[in-house]
């Protein structure tokens, strides 16, 4: 079983490297050999995606129109694009404007994103619907809580602000908006705003469809977006951001979405073994072992460098990885190895999403959990579009 698991991980890692490689000639021979198999699977996947989209566009498959406005947050590539943090960010913006939202998430990969959202929304008016059938989840919550009066929603729309106002919870329970987390491929629900998240660090990899590449949709799907948000914008140069916008515009074929930028702003470290928060300066000058199972581990290591880490040594696992005791052994071995070779403080760091998958496991080890929140930059047009949608 252990050998099988290792071989499975090696295969997954190979697929990730193939997807990220802009030039296949740079890949090892074995990975170049499996690329033709991935290419065939990719062609089948692309055909299915396009056929499904055509069936919805032709009205053969019908999307359900909810009785409240729907904002979809999605992407065209796999993992690490900031979909769930953006869904959370928007939920708070609506709450601060006096509009109760539903956040609809499928709970994929063991439900780590759903678990994190539940923790962050605890005690707030945000309702969380978790499950594959998001139509059923939404209608159930709307039946229970009721729908916000349209005139009231329109009057509150002008209060939508990305400025981080202090919370003033709505006094009623009626729902005024639904937010689809990872909604771009969820065609069963009609949406009023399509927000597409794009990772500035990894962009589109080799620009091939899954499993040959990272694309979940053809790049011409970007034309459906009303808003394109370039995420992790703080981790690349200004020149690179300009180049990314030019690349995106090349796929839009005349459509004119609003462009915005976002980042994951570090808030604090949390130490599970001591059950206390620590300052972000805790890693300044330290040698860091970054252990994570997130969609874009590059972004986390770059963030730690920006926080002042002198070195970052990565232990990367697949997105949604369920950490076990053997993974902790690998981490402790790496820490011990580094302590023997450096005079600097050695610190282990993981992400909040990784921690919440198995809190009790992490509490038995000296690890810092990096807690971050999404921040939107250059947001005026984005904010105005949302306000106008809610005012209709």
Image (cartoon, rainbow, N blue to C red):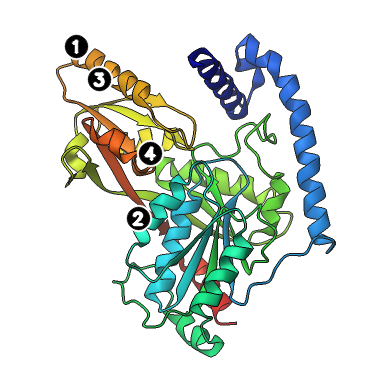
Where disc 1 sits, the SS reads helix
What whole-number distance in Å separates the C-alpha atoms at marks 2 and 4? 14 Å
What whole-number distance in Å separates the C-alpha atoms at marks 3 and 2? 30 Å
Q: Disc 3 vs disc 4: which is toward the camera?
A: 4
Residue 43: % across, % down: 79, 33
Residue 119 badge: 2
Residue 335 badge: 3
In this view, the residue in front, 127 or 144, is 144
Residue 310: % across, % down: 24, 27
In this view, the residue in front, 234 or 20, is 20
Residue 355: % across, % down: 34, 40
Label 1 crowd (10 A; few <14 / some 14-19 / many >=20): few
Residue visible at 64% across and 23% down in the picture: 23
| Labels 3 and 1: the sequence-earlier one | 3
Q: Disc 1 vs disc 4: which is toward the camera?
A: 4
What whole-number distance in Å separates the C-alpha atoms at marks 3 and 4? 19 Å
As drawn, is 368 to the left or to the right of 204? left
Residue 18: % across, % down: 62, 24
Instruction: Tell me the residue that label 4 is attached to.
Output: 354
Q: Which quadrant of the view contains residue 46?
A: top right
Q: Which residue of the protein is positioned furthest toward the bottom in this rendering?
A: 151
Label 3 crowd (10 A; few <14 / some 14-19 / many >=20): some
Residue visible at 49% across and 35% down in the picture: 319
Instruction: Tell me the residue that label 1 is attached to.
Output: 340
| Labels 3 and 2: the sequence-earlier one | 2
What whole-number distance in Å separates the C-alpha atoms at marks 3 and 1? 9 Å
């Amino acid at each position: 079983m252990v050998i099988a698991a290792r071989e499975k991980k090696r295969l997954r890692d190979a697929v990730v490297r193939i997807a990220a490689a802009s030039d296949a000639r740079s890949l090892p021979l074995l990975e170049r050999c499996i690329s033709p198999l991935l290419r065939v699977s990719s062609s089948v996947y692309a055909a299915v995606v396009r056929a499904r989209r055509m069936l919805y566009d032709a009205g053969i498959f019908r999307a359900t129109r909810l009785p409240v406005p729907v904002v979809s947050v999605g992407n065209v590539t796999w993992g690490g694009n900031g979909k769930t943090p953006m869904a959370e960010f928007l939920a708070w913006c609506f709450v601060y404007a006096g509009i109760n939202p539903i956040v609809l998430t499928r709970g994929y990969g063991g439900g780590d994103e759903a678990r994190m959202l539940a923790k962050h929304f605890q005690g707030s008016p945000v309702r969380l619907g978790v499950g594959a059938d998001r139509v059923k989840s939404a209608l159930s919550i709307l039946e229970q809580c009721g729908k916000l009066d349209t005139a009231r929603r329109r009057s509150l729309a002008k209060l939508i602000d990305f400025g981080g106002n202090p919370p003033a919870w709505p006094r009623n329970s009626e729902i005024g908006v639904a937010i689809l987390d990872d909604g771009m491929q969820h065609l069963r629900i009609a949406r009023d705003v399509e927000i597409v998240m794009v990772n500035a660090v990894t962009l589109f990899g080799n620009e091939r469809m899954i499993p040959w590449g990272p694309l979940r949709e053809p790049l011409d799907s970007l034309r459906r977006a009303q808003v394109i948000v370039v995420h992790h914008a703080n981790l690349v140069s200004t020149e690179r951001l300009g180049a990314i916008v030019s690349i995106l515009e090349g796929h839009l074929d005349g459509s004119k979405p609003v462009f915005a930028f976002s980042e994951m702003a570090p808030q604090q470290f949390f130490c599970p073994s001591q059950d206390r928060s620590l300052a972000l300066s805790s890693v300044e000058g330290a040698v860091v072992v970054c252990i994570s199972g997130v969609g874009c581990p590059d972004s986390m290591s770059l963030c730690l460098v920006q926080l002042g880490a002198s070195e970052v040594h990565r232990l990367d696992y697949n997105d949604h990885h369920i950490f076990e005791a053997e993974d902790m052994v690998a981490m402790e071995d790496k820490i011990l190895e580094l302590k023997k070779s450096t005079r600097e403080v050695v610190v282990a760091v993981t992400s909040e999403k990784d921690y919440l998958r198995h809190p009790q496991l992490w509490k038995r080890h000296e690890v810092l959990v990096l807690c971050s929140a999404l921040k939107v930059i250059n947001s005026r047009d984005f904010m105005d579009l949302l306000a106008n949608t809610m005012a209709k």
